[in-house]
């Protein structure tokens, strides 16, 4: 019996050594998840939507509100079209407050929007944004992450800035909409040609 136990322990030690020594660093290959993401992207592209990701940086203080922001009680028709193409239900803030969004953007520059969002979930936090562009509409949906049980959530409302990558939106005029449950925020953005 001792020989069997020793063989099992030696096998586990050998397996652990090879697993740790020869394992690929970084994120593991997940064929099912990657296939589903490709299918979702193809479905969005076939419907005319372009998808890109924006970053989020939490801030304690915001600049003074600027730009002509229009509150919207109803979501635009483009949001209804997009909700049928994206998997899962959207988790949206209640509303956006103190929005500072420039109305113009030079080509090749990143775009920064400062905002304050009122959340209804105490255990979730914004970690980034998904931005969807079709024709002259840009819809912005936050990405969330559950907080570990031991951490204290940020105070509500959450203040921060959203950063779009440079060149994400080509030259033209757009209606940008930050989607929310109670009251979405919309403004016009003009990206000048080169």
Image: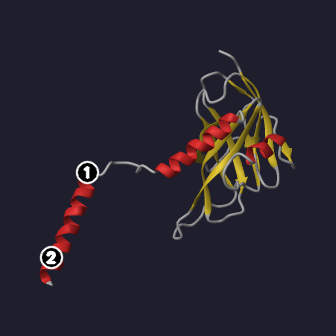
| Quadrant of the snapshot with the N terminus | bottom left
Element type at mark 2:
helix
Protein image colouring: secondary structure
Q: How many marks?
A: 2
Res. 65 in view: no
Between the C-alphas of marks 1 and 2, the distance is: 24 Å
x then y, percent, for residue 139: 73, 40
In front of the other: 166 or 170: 170
Is tag 1's residue or tag 2's residue first in the polypeptide sequence? 2
Is 178 rendered above or below residue 10? Answer: above
Quadrant housing residue 177:
top right
The answer to whether mark 1 and mark 2 are in CB contact below 8 A is no
| Mark number displayed over residue 6 | 2
| Mark number displayed over residue 22 | 1
Res. 159 in view: yes
Quadrant housing residue 103:
top right
x then y, percent, for residue 27: 41, 49
Element type at mark 1:
helix
Q: Which residue is drawn at 74% across and 43% down?
A: 82
x then y, percent, for residue 83: 74, 48
Is 9 rendered above or below residue 142? Answer: below
Crowd rating for badge 1 (residues with CA inside 10 Å; few <14, some 14–19, many 20+)? few
Q: In this view, does 59 lie to the left or right of 180?
A: left
Q: Which residue is drawn at 70% across and 43% down?
A: 140
Is 123 rendered above or below residue 129? Answer: below
Q: Residue at x 66, y 51 (%)?
A: 87
Crowd rating for badge 2 (residues with CA inside 10 Å; few <14, some 14–19, many 20+)? few
Is 150 rendered above or below residue 98? Answer: below
Residue most toward the bottom? Answer: 1
Residue most toward the right? Answer: 73
């Amino acid at each position: 019996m001792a020989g069997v136990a020793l063989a099992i322990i030696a096998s586990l030690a050998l397996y652990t050594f090879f697993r740790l020594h020869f394992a690929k660093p970084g994120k593991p290959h997940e064929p099912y998840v990657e296939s589903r993401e490709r299918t979702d992207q193809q479905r969005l592209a076939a419907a005319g939507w372009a998808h890109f990701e924006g970053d989020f940086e939490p801030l304690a203080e915001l600049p003074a509100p600027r730009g002509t922001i229009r509150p919207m009680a109803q979501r635009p028709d483009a949001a209804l079209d997009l909700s049928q193409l994206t998997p899962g239900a959207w988790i949206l803030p209640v509303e956006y407050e103190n929005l500072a969004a420039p109305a113009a953007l030079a080509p090749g520059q990143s775009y920064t929007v400062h905002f304050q969002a009122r959340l209804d979930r105490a255990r979730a936090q914004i970690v980034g944004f998904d931005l969807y562009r079709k024709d002259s509409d840009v819809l912005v949906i936050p990405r969330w992450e559950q907080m570990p049980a031991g951490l204290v959530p940020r105070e509500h409302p959450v203040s921060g800035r959203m950063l779009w990558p440079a060149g994400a939106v080509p030259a033209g005029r757009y209606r940008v909409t930050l989607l929310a449950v109670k009251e979405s925020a919309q403004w016009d953005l003009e990206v000048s040609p080169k």
